[in-house]
Amino acid sequence: PDEAARRARHAAVDAGTNFGDTADVYGDGRSERLVARLRRERKGEAIHVATKAGRRLPPQTPEGYSRANLPAWVERSLRKLEMEAVDLLQLHCPHPKVYDSPEVFGILEDLVKDGKVRYYGVSVETVDEALRAIRHGGVRTVQIIFNMFRLKPAEELFAQAWNRRVGILARVPLASGLLTGKLTKASTF
């Protein structure tokens, strides 16, 4: 429920969190609206916002990441977030061919130049996708699954990201709850 989500977000800020990650498809914009509400209620506090775009495409195709779609997705997110510019826009696990498309990354650069996006990055499924993405000079972050069960990013990606000054956002750090300590041999599903 919205009120429980509101309390959780406030508790996170009270505990020192100043970064929120969401996506345009989480609740079809509901999550972005909740982030906007938090920012209104915590006016004056620095809360940096990352959102993701690209999963609105019914079929995932490289052509869907177009000069018409990407700016439209950003505008929709900006309205929901009640922001002039999003702090970090991430491509949301796009079609694998997108990582090899200078045109798509050129559109992202234009969104930065237009003041709609401060920085951009990618949310990926694989280390290979991450490595292909960071070849594009403007990519500032990679969001990738990293936890005690999925350590592959540490083998090659982290060093290359460090060398290119690309930040890493760990996805699923608690392995969808498996690493919370709440599951035991007696747990049933």
Image: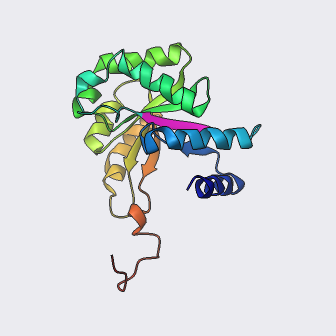
Q: How is the image coloured?
A: rainbow
Q: Residue at x 36, y 15 (%)?
A: 68
The majority secondary structure of the magenta stretch comes to: strand
Q: Residue at x 61, y 23 (%)?
A: 84
Q: As rendered, which of 64 and 112 lies closer to the eye?
A: 64
Give coordinates of residue 124: x percent, y percent: 33, 41
Q: As rendered, which of 146 and 62 lies closer to the eye?
A: 62
- In this image, 69 relative to 166: left or right? left
Q: Residue at x 33, y 75 (%)?
A: 189
Question: Is residue 138 among the parts visible in the rendering?
Answer: no
Q: Quadrant of residue 146?
A: bottom left
Q: Does residue 15 sit above or below 127 in this rendering?
A: below
Q: As rendered, which of 26 and 87 lies closer to the eye?
A: 26
State yes or no: residue 50 in magenta. yes
Q: Residues in magenta?
A: 46-52
- In this image, 128 relative to 107: left or right? left
State yes or no: residue 145 in magenta. no
Give coordinates of residue 94: x percent, y percent: 30, 34
Residue extending furthest toward the right? 44
Q: Residue at x 34, y 36 (%)?
A: 55
Task: Quadrant for the N terminus, please.
Answer: bottom right
Give coordinates of residue 98: x percent, y percent: 27, 27
Question: Is residue 132 among the parts visible in the rendering?
Answer: yes
Please state the total of marks drawn on the protein image.
0
Give coordinates of residue 103: x percent, y percent: 31, 16
- In this image, 58 relative to 10: left or right? left
Q: Quadrant of residue 141?
A: top left
Q: Does residue 19 sit above or below 72 in this rendering?
A: below
